[in-house]
Amino acid sequence: MMNYRKLGALAAIFATAAFLPPALPAQEAKTQSLTLKECVVQAIRHNLGVAVQVISARQSESAVTLAGEKFLPSLSFDFYRDRQNASSYSWMDSSNVSTTASSSLSGSVNQNLPLGGSMSLGLSGGMNESNSRFQTINPYYSGRLSFQWTQPLLRDFGWGTSRKDIIVARNNNDIAGNTLKSALIETVYSVEQAYWELVYQIESLAVQRQSLKLAEDLQEKNRKEVEIGTLAPKEILSSQAEVASRKADILRSEMMVKDSADALRGLLNLDFGPDAGEIIPAETPGFEKTEVNLDDVLALALANRPDLQSSAIGVRNREVDYSFAKNQMLPSLSLSAR
């Protein structure tokens, strides 16, 4: 029997290829001889549940990146230009048309601080030009350099409070990874169970056919003994009933083989049409003796179960939400400088 750790590692490798087209389309396949590893790969590549969890994991990774952008500096620029022409209604104007032109360029950098505060630095410059005789400096230029710093002291203060969205996004990303791992484990387990069930039903059918052969041989033997008079004629009826019973068992076994093959076919997402062909397992079960200690396997199960790990991460998320909610109950008090 294949080791689950090896199958899990194999599943993780092929999980990223969930949307790749199959190497051999199902409708082109006839009779297929598949190993257990090939079945696992096929199931993971075409399992819709695994594909959904792969997308969810990628979305959670994007959420972590998006949350981390909170502490990236924000750079902005602004340009303004205006020109106005108006008729003159005063003899003090220098001409019949009053013209005013102005332009400005500004840039600013904004940065969120780890303890909840923020700071910004801005630089702007402008020019104004006019044909008015009252503007003695023409054109004239202006400039401005500004700096502002704000730090909350009670509400919104603290490393954990400012990074709350990042912490939650990272925890959700870990939960999504565990959910994907659970989907892979369930897929591998289901495929392995269906594969060995099909192997068992095929072997059982072979045993039933062998039993039918033995029953038919016994029937022929009884018929000859009845002909020579060494056996009562009623024994023929008993052997005939045994042959009929064996044939009925074969019909049931053939149905079980078909049902088991269909179950495996469904996990592999193969075609169920009349041209689907048969699935023939290429492996036989083996035997490996393993000695285990109850305490060790319990500790291993508790350490490796994705659902328990997700529950523990969910508890940490609740603790972060609780701490943030307590902080939001504090009064607002900030220190500012500009």
Image: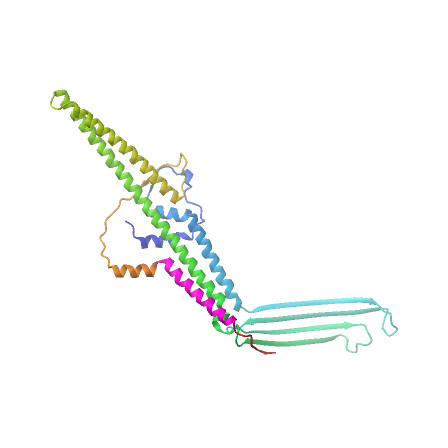
Q: How many marks?
A: 0
Is residue 45 found inside the magenta-colored segment of the image? no
Compared to residue 338, the image places residue 73 above or below, namely above
How does the figure colour the protein chain or chains?
rainbow
Q: Is 204 situated left or right of 176 in this image? A: left
Which residue appears farthest toward the left when viewing the image?
230
Which residue appears farthest toward the right when viewing the image?
91
Compared to residue 241, the image places residue 195 above or below, namely below
Residue 286 is situated, as x and y percent measured from the top left of the image, at 24, 47
Image quarter of the C terminus? bottom right
Residue under the image location 24 percent in, 35 percent down: 208
Q: Quadrant of residue 232?
A: top left
Residue under the image location 46 percent in, 57 percent down: 58
Residue 239 is situated, as x and y percent measured from the top left of the image, at 19, 27
- Foreground residue among 52 and 329: 329
- Foreground residue among 150 and 62: 150
Q: Quadrant of residue 78?
A: bottom right
Residue under the image location 35 percent in, 50 percent down: 188
Q: Is 198 situated left or right of 166 in this image? A: left
- Foreground residue among 146 and 189: 189
Is residue 322 found inside the magenta-colored segment of the image? yes
Compared to residue 304, the image places residue 269 above or below, namely above
Q: Is 3 situated left or right of 309 in this image? A: left
Q: Which stretch appears magenta?
A: 305-329
Q: Is 45 situated left or right of 225 in this image? A: right
Q: Could one spot residue 47 in this view of the protein? A: yes
Task: From the image, give the main secondary structure of the stretch colored magenta.
Answer: helix
Residue 334 is situated, as x and y percent measured from the top left of the image, at 56, 77
Residue 179 is situated, as x and y percent measured from the top left of the image, at 41, 56
Q: Could one spot residue 32 in this view of the protein? A: no
Residue under the image location 38 percent in, 58 percent down: 307
